Image (cartoon, rainbow, N blue to C red):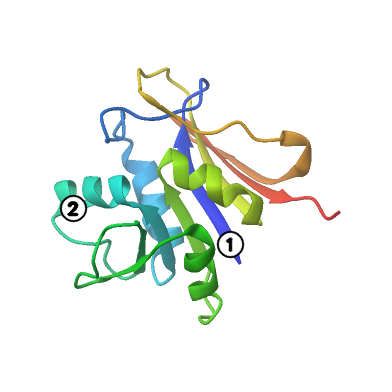
Amino acid sequence: MISLIVGMTPERVIGNKNELPWYISEDLKNFKALTSENIVIMGRNTYDSIIARIGKPLPNRTNIVISRSMEEKEGIQVCRSIQEAIALTKKENKEAFIIGGAQIYKEALPFVDKMYISYVKKAYKGDTLFPEWNKNEWEEIEKKPFEEFDFVILQRKKK
């Protein structure tokens, strides 16, 4: 299954200067619980921001980085396109999570079956937005309110 996980403000802000504009511990715990023992697919900038923050790829996950120029590195697999990354995940019986950034989300949306969204309640300034998507193609299957965000799971409607 191809899923997408994202935190965004009401204005669809997802990043600022290649970092998350907020720090919400409960949201990070939720991200870790969902993605651990699974596959994460990200673009080069998202990978670079993770390395800058924790100094290594995300632990306890298969890390796939989409980049046209990056070489293989320890702890990651490099794919040249979202299609190549998705094909690679089909070999494993795990959920694959698209974790950003904006361009990767945009390219992956047509292939995504489920979206895990943390709607951050406070407005933050940012230079990166989540792409527009057709909300009519999705149905809400779960919603959990938290103090600083609402966690929503959307599933693509069957055609």
Query: Where 44 sits versus 11, above or below?
Result: below
Q: Residue at x 13, y 56 (%)?
A: 55
The outermost residue toward the right is 159
Where residue 2 is drawn, which disc sits there? Answer: 1
Q: Amino acid at mark 2?
A: Ile
Where residue 65 is drawn, which disc sits there? Answer: none
Could you tell me which quadrant the N terminus lies in?
A: bottom right
Nearest the viewer among 35 and 104 is: 104
* Residue 84 appears left or right of 125: right
Whichever of callouts 2 and 1 sits on the residue coming sooner in the sequence is: 1
* Residue 105 appears left or right of 44: right
Looking at the rendered structure, the number of numbered marks drawn on it comes to 2
Element under disc 1: strand
* Residue 71 appears left or right of 112: left
Q: Residue at x 40, y 62 (%)?
A: 80
Query: Where 36 sits versus 103, above or below?
Result: below
Query: Where 16 sits versus 152, above or below?
Result: above
Residue placed under numbered mark 2 in the picture: 51
Q: Position of residue 122 (x, y in %)?
A: 43, 20
Q: Amino acid at mark 1?
A: Ile
Could you tell me which quadrant the C terminus lies in?
A: bottom right
Element under disc 2: helix
Q: Residues within 10 Å of mark 1 (few under 14, many from 20)?
A: many
Q: Position of residue 97 (x, y in %)?
A: 48, 59
Whether residue 147 is visible to the viewer of this picture, yes or no, is no
Nearest the viewer among 33 and 131 is: 131
Cα distance between the residues tagged 2 and 1: 24 Å
Q: Position of residue 44 (x, y in %)?
A: 30, 51
Whether residue 19 is visible to the viewer of this picture, yes or no, is yes
| Disc 2 and disc 1 in contact, CB within 8 angstroms | no
